[in-house]
Structures are given as structure tokens and as C-alpha cells.
Image (cartoon, rainbow, N blue to C red):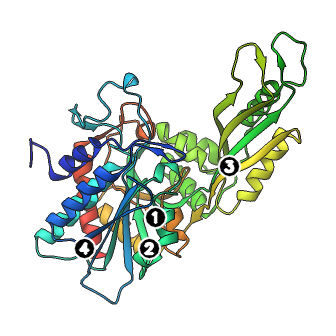
Amino acid sequence: MTDGLSRTAQLARDLIRFDTQNWGGGRSSGEADAAAYVAEVLASMGVESQTLESAPGRASVIARIEGTDPSLPLLVVHGHLDVVPADASEWSVDPFAGEIRDGCLWGRGAVDMKQMDAMILAALERILAAGRRPRRGLVIAFFADEEAGGEYGAHWLVREHPELFAGATEAISEVGGYSVEIAGTRAYLLQTAEKALQWILLRARGTAAHGSQHMRDNAVTKLARAVADVGAHEFPVELTETTRALIAGVAELLGVEDDDPDAVAERTGTISRFLRSSLRHTANPTMLEAGYKHNVIPSVAEARIDVRPLPGRETEAIDAIKAIVGDDIEVELVHGDVGIEHPYSGELVEAMAAALTRHDPEARVLPYMLSGGTDNKSLSELGIAGYGFAPLKLTPDLDFAAMFHGVDERVPLTALDFGTDVLEDLLLTY
């Protein structure tokens, strides 16, 4: 304990205090200082690591730890060191102070995902300090640039240094293994799938002119119409193996039929914003850009759309967007990444579920599909099957879905300690 904090909370607090904001497009505060801290913590437990920079300041840390059974394939345990930007004027606390308040650790990265980085380090410290080793060999990775698609982090490492992951067949990372309360029962959502990613640009062209003129060939007007149509479009529900099992499990807990998946997901409270998004393609306008002066009609107007297709349905989703906006709007794919889906079965799934229930015997474990994405997408290019498993036992009053990229991001201190216990258990037994 340091300052009354557990080792996990101390590590997470220290990591939050590194400003690693990532605005995308290569613009970032950089991960180098946080990477140096992680490398130092690993060195203190006798673990040699490599720090690799894809560009100045864009640093990732990789290490290997030998297991007790060398016949087993390796497991990649990974987190990312960057965070999305935080506007301090909107927060109740300094987002980079790592403040402890109301039994929670507050700050950008408390949930996404410096808390998991800390749990990984703390679990490894415990195991190695006790003279033990994990059952199988581990590749430990702390990536740069996850929040912008991993081009300076996981994607770069997979492309330029695939040998770092040689021998690994599976991986665990963020946004899975956390608890929700459904009809009075605590259930843990184990992430076995994640949607694909398409960041697209809509571009409208028109006639440049004085703002006082009668002008129907207006790029801004064309774009506004297209953006409104995309934002209002409701894609139909289409279940996959993962979401079918999820809805069946949730319906059972609620005591209702599962013939209306959207209605079932909506009854899960605040977490419904995650679950409903996993049942369909989604497309959300996020940025607009046009013009340079109040009295000038611009010739070009652009919008950014965040499209999240169901796994394996990327072409279908972008074709639907093109049909919605019509031939007059250009559609450009700025960045795309694959979706992934793995069966809710097998030794790793069984081991994760068992570790959770050993530490919370009354809980249920359900599979789910992440509506966002993780660096598991990059690892999938090497044939590594990635799951979301950052175990957290949360209080029902915490709107966990709102913590991701939200204001006043925070995580209960007790959840950090629970997660470290579960993660240590998994690494020793799987």
C-alpha cells in the first residue's frame, strides 16, 4: 500500500498523470514518458522489455515472460498507453491529476484503459515476487496509438515486427469481463467479438459564390442533407452467433421472451447503449468542415462519419451509406479495420469465466460484441484470436458506458483490486 492505495491503484494513478492524449492523424502528446514508466516497472520485477518508436515519441513497450509449461502457445496480454483528449473545463477534477474521490480513481484513462495497464503490471508483480510464473508464456504489450486505429502502435508493430508475437495464438485486452446488473443479478460481459471500423469522409461539391447570391448549387446545403439522412438512418437488427447468445442470456435473466432483441437490450439500463449498438450496423456523424468566411459560399463541404459494421459485413455497410447519400455525394474511406468474432467456447473462454466465478461465485458470465474496437484487430492479422477481458466488479449505480471517452471518467478502487485478483488467477491457471 502506498498513500493508502493498493499497488494497482497507485500504478493506475501514476499512468493517468502522464498526458498521452491522442487527437488522431498523427497529432498526439506521445506515449514515450508513460512507456518509460512501464519499462521501469517491468525492470523492477526483473522483466526485460523493448521500447519501440514508430515515430518520435510514439512508443510501445513489449516484453516476454516465460511460462511453466513451454509446450503451450503464448498468450498476448495487452493494453494501450494513449487516451482520447480531455477538455479540463468540462471536468469536475483535473483529468490528468489521478485524483481519488468518493472511493474512485478519477482521470482520463481510468477506464480506457490505464486501469487495465495497471492491473497487468500489478498481477505480474505479485506472481513474480512470489517466485511463481504464469502457466503459459506471455507476450506483454503496451501499445501506442490505439485511440486512432493503431497506425503508430499495434498495426505498425504487427507489420514491421511480427516476430515479437511469434508463438502466440490468443490475446486478452480491454472492454470485457466487467459487471452489469440485470434484474438484480450481477452478470459479467465477456467480449468475444467486436464490430468492424470504417471512418469515412462525405464530400459535397458546389459553386463558390458570394453569400448574398441566390444559389441552389450549395455544397453546405447538399452536405447537411446527406449528414442528416445518415444520422437519422436506423439499420435493422441482425444477430450474429455472439449477440444471439447474449440476448438469450439477458432475456433469461429478465424473465422475458427473446423474440425482440432490441427491446431486450434496451431493458439493461445504461449499458443498453453498448448492447443495442452491437445488434446492427451504426453510422454516426462526428465532424463537419466547410467554408472560410461568413459571406462566402464554399465550393466544398466535408463531414466525417464513424461507421461500425457487423463483423464481415464491411462492404455491405459502406454500400448502404452510398445509397443513403446518393450519387451527388462523394464517399471516401479514410480508415478501415476488420471486425472479429470468436466462439463463446474453448479453453480460454472457460478459463476466463472460471476465474471470474471463483472470485464472484454468484455471478453469471455472458458473451457480448463490443460496438467499438481494440488492438485485437491488429493482432488478428497474425492469426491471434483476441478477447476483451479487463475484469471489473462494478457498483450498479456507476454508468460505466458513459465512462468511455466521457467526462469525469472514473473507476472504483475496489474494482481495480478485484480485477487484479482475477487477472492473476487467470495467468496462473490458463
Q: Residues within 10 Å of mark 1 (few under 14, many from 20)?
A: many
Q: Nearer the viewer, residue 15 or 235?
A: 15
| Mark 4 surroundings: few (<14), some (14-19) or many (≥20) residues within 10 A | some
Residues at discs 1 and 4 in contact (Cβ within 8 Å):
no
Q: Which residue is mark 1?
A: 387
Residue 269 x %, y %: 48, 37
Q: Residue at x 28, y 71 (%)?
A: 427
Q: CA distance from mark 2 to mark 1?
A: 8 Å
Q: Nearer the viewer, residue 257 or 394?
A: 394
Could you tell whether 352 is left or right of 245 in the image? Answer: left
Specify which label sits upstream in the sequence, 1 or 4.
1
Compared to residue 82, the image places residue 153 above or below, namely: below
Image x and y of residue 32, in percent? 33, 53
Q: Residue furthest bottom?
A: 71
Which labelled disc corresponds to residue 341? none
For marks 4 and 2 on the same chain, the one whose residue lies earlier in the sequence: 2
The residue beneath circle 2 is 170
Task: Please tell me whether residue 402 is drawn above or below residue 384 in the rendered image.
Answer: above
* Residue occupying the point 14% across, 49% down: 6
Lower position in the chain sequence, tag 2 or tag 1: 2
Cα–Cα gap, marks 3 and 4: 38 Å
- Tell me: residue 399, above or below residue 241: above
**Residue picked out by circle 4:** 428
